[in-house]
Image: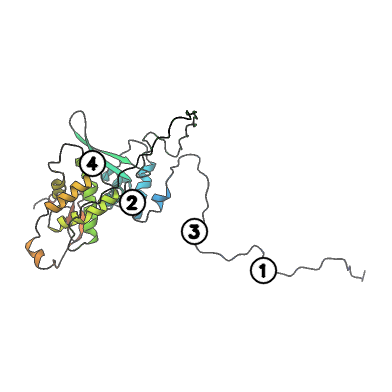
Amino acid sequence: MGTQNTSARTSSRSRKGAENHPLTRARVAGVVHDNVRHTTRFTVVGNHLAQHTALSLLAIGLAVHIQSLPGGAPIDIKTLAARFPEGTTRIAAGLRELEVHGYLRRTRERTGNGRMVTRTVSCNQPGRSGGAEEGHGKASKPKPATHRAEPKHQAEPKRRTDPKRRALPAVPQPAYPAPDLLATALGVLAGLHREDPRLHLSATDADHLAPGVAAWLERELTPDAVRRALTFDLPTEPLHRPAALLAHRLNTQLPPLPPFRTEHPPTVRHPLQNCDLCDHAYRAPEPGTCGTCTPVT
């Protein structure tokens, strides 16, 4: 009874909390994903949109929401403002961002009864045509490849190479290129294809032309006035280089600076606001309605 069992296992060293625990690791700061695979009601969104470096968070959220909607769902400013708390001004700015970067295409079309309507196309991959009939969250199955034996004597067709693209003409530069001025200029360029579908511009062309439009806006022209000047009396033949035509007009038809602008910059330059009613840009210290929509008292 008094002898000890020399074969008994010695007691292990006690641990204090998680000290010396083999599974304990130093925690690294950052997000930890707890993901569950979706099987129904999901939308595939590319990282080129979700992690876009030039789009605002509002614009990215709008794009994801629009891509999740079924075909034919209304996505006008008033409908989106009724759905979300951001308001018409911020939503209108977010839609313009998506249009500038190719995630939205808005064109004006005439119906059979002569009425003009706006047709909006959501692009989940700008620059690529995926077809509007594909379902949400479903990947189309690739067609099986068919192999056909070609005669050995048939020569391999030569690859067609596009001619080297010529540089666009230079455009006027604004004296005071404020960020809000350039953003309004991009909005003007993004909406030109509504007046004429031939004026659909790439993001590169829009970036090149934006300073020229900003130079016009500096001369106290409204965005609508600049849009009318750029789209008035366009040639009837096909436009092979619409950006070059617009650059030419921005140069040759540039209005003169107002008298006070030739001496010194204005002491007060209010930021650009978007009218809550007509969605047109105007300068004011606070958001609201433009002079056209404001009732005269």
Give the residue at mark 1.
Answer: 20
Estimate the x, y position of residue 257 in percent, counting from the top left: 10, 60
Instruction: Tell me which label, 1 or 4, sits earlier in the chain.
Output: 1
Q: Which quadrant of the figure has residue 109?
A: top left
Give the residue at mark 3.
Answer: 31
What is the three-letter code of the residue carrying label 2?
A: Ala
Question: Helix or strand or loop: what does disc 1 sit on?
Answer: loop
Alpha carbon separation for disc pair 2 and 1: 48 Å
Mark 4 or mark 3, whichever is nearer to me = 4
Give the residue at mark 4.
Answer: 240
Instruction: Tell me which label, 2 or 1, sits earlier in the chain.
Output: 1
Q: Tell me the residue at 85%/66% (across/down).
A: 8
Alpha carbon separation for disc pair 3 and 1: 26 Å
Alpha carbon separation for disc pair 2 and 3: 23 Å
Instruction: Tell me which label, 3 or 1, sits earlier in the chain.
Output: 1
Marks 3/1 in contact by CB < 8 Å: the verdict is no
Q: Tell me the residue at 33%/49% (across/down).
A: 84
Q: Tell me the residue at 18%/60% (across/down).
A: 174
- Front residue of 156 and 146: 156
Residue 59 is marked as 2
When the figure is inspected, residue 142 is found, relative to residue 43, above or below; the finding is: above
When the figure is inspected, residue 161 is found, relative to residue 154, above or below; the finding is: below
Question: Helix or strand or loop: what does disc 4 sit on?
Answer: loop
Q: Is residue 296 left or right of residue 64?
A: left
Estimate the x, y position of residue 181 in percent, counting from the top left: 21, 58
Mark 1 or mark 4, whichever is nearer to me = 4
Visible residue check, residue 241: yes
